[in-house]
Amino acid sequence: MHKYANPTQFMRIANAIYPWVAGLCLLLFAAAIPVALMFSPPDYQQGETVRIMYIHVSSAWLMMMIYGIIAANSAMFLIWRHPMASIAARASAPMGAVFCALALITGMLWGQPMWGTFWVWDARLTSTLILFFLYIGYIALADAFEDSERGDKAAAVLALVGSVNVPIIHFSVEWWNTLHQPSILKAGKEGVGSSVHGSILLPLFLMMGAFTMFYFALLVLRLRSELLAAKIRNARLSQIAGHSAAQPAE
Amino acid sequence: MSVFTALLSRDLKLALRQSADSLTVIAFFAIATVLFPFGVGPEAEILSRIAAGVVWVAALLAALLSLDRVFTVDFEDGTLDQLLLNGQSMTFVVLAKVIAHWLTTGVPLIIMSPILAITLQLPAEGYGTLVLALLLGTPTVSLVGALGAALVLGARRGGVLLSLLVLPLYIPVLIFGTAAVEAALTGMPSAPMLSILGGFALIAITLCPFGTAAALRQAAE
Amino acid sequence: MAFENFAAFIDMGGYAAWVWTAYGLAAAALVGMLVISRRTLKAREREFEDLKANRR
């Protein structure tokens, strides 16, 4: 596995699979959008709003998966100093934040017609909001230093701290929620959570697959971009070094 | 171990000499708390309902104010590099700094909190639990805060960034800290919440010093 | 097909505002990420080419 830590090696493979991932992404979207919007039946309880759930759950899935990927890459970066790992984490974080925001907003758009309010301090919504803040903090910390390597390291430590904390926060919020929330919302939530039946699963899995492939395809583009940025920085530095070395000789 | 006690006593002496720093934090704690009656009105029912939460939130914000000073002085005057070069165990250095921070800000906040709770009309049953909860919760605040402070050493806009990083991580402490007081007020046992706060402190003291030490090493490189 | 005609499809059982806003925002977010990522990639490719050209 360590062989893929080399950026050139890694990018050779990434670039080779990129057309397949991008093609699969397009194919899945081409199937998921019509099925989710037109061909799947409305839910017996939630009517047509169930269609929001397909993108809501897909965004929520990606925001969690991307956090996991960032945490795993941060661990690899801190333990084995794999440069590719920190680049992958840095390239993923903004996408994670966007999917987190998307999960929040689609959740609100789903909540208003179903619960009669845009926002409730429901355990899942609250945890998602906190995860959004963690993403923002991660991105801000990674960008806060003149020396980008220091930013990478600090952000990696933060991601690991976060991965210990996310379950604790989730457990606390869940507990806090059962302490404070009246049980009216539970009924609405059970309808979402437990009575999932077949007609919902197909569009949901298609959409989740499409979103996931979208993330991986875009990740390849963003990795190329990050590696180029590093090359540009190095070229600039060596140019400056070359100039100052040449000056005394002249 | 001698470095540990030396660092601790030096930090405490420094804090005593510059006691204005600690006093500012306490003053901030008092002012932030006193703002709430103006915001929500002076009715005793509302105030006593929110008292524990307000005291906790204000204490967290006040602790946050003092955090960016924990390592900056040592970072800027080179003490940190010295300690690293001498091959000191960074974990012990961190523990000494955290204990000093807790003694100079956590303890004053705890002492101040019942007085502020009086102004917020906290019922008599709540005081003991409030102090106990703060006693068990503030070590976690100092430990996690020190980790954040080490991460933002040398960063642009370090102070604002620190609050962005650390405040979400304080939410569990806030939840169980206020829940303990609420339980005491409604005649329920508050021991479960207090033990969870103690559990958080134990998790924090086993994990945070290592992360903080790693972050300090990165900062000094 | 879950809808009888095109108007019913647009109406989304009365929830048009919520469903179409959600899908519109999701589409905007995904397309936005794609456009921004591609644009920075292209800009950096150009910058890198310029740097290489200048050095020779």
Image (tube, rainbow, N blue to C red):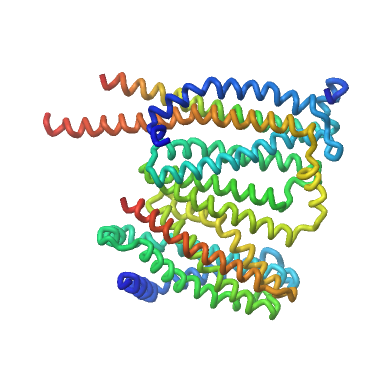
Q: Which residue lies furthest to the right in this view?
A: C4
Q: Residue furthest left?
A: A249
Q: Is residue A51 visible in this depiction of the protein?
A: yes
In the rendered image, the vertical position of residue B189 relative to residue A5, given as above or below = below
Horizontal arrangement in the rendering, residue A158 relative to residue A180 (left or right): left
Q: Could you tell me residue A197's position as x and y percent?
A: 80, 37
Q: Is residue B21 visible in this depiction of the protein?
A: no
Q: Residue furthest front?
A: A1
Horizontal arrangement in the rendering, residue B203 relative to residue A210 (left or right): left
Q: Quadrant of the N terminus of chain B?
A: bottom left
Q: Nearer the viewer, residue B115 or B96?
A: B96
| Total numbered circles | 0
In the rendered image, the vertical position of residue B21 relative to residue C34, given as above or below = below
- The residue that appears at 34% across and 74% down in the rendered structure is B5
Q: Could you tell me residue B159's position as x and y percent?
A: 46, 55
Q: Residue furthest bottom?
A: B124
Q: Nearer the viewer, residue A207 or A93?
A: A207
- The residue that appears at 83% across and 28% down in the rendered structure is C11
Q: Nearer the viewer, residue A103 or A187?
A: A187
Horizontal arrangement in the rendering, residue A43 relative to residue B71 (left or right): right
Q: Could you tell me residue C39's position as x and y percent?
A: 49, 25
In the rendered image, the vertical position of residue A140 relative to residue A216, given as above or below = below
Q: Could you tell me residue A25's position as x and y percent?
A: 61, 24
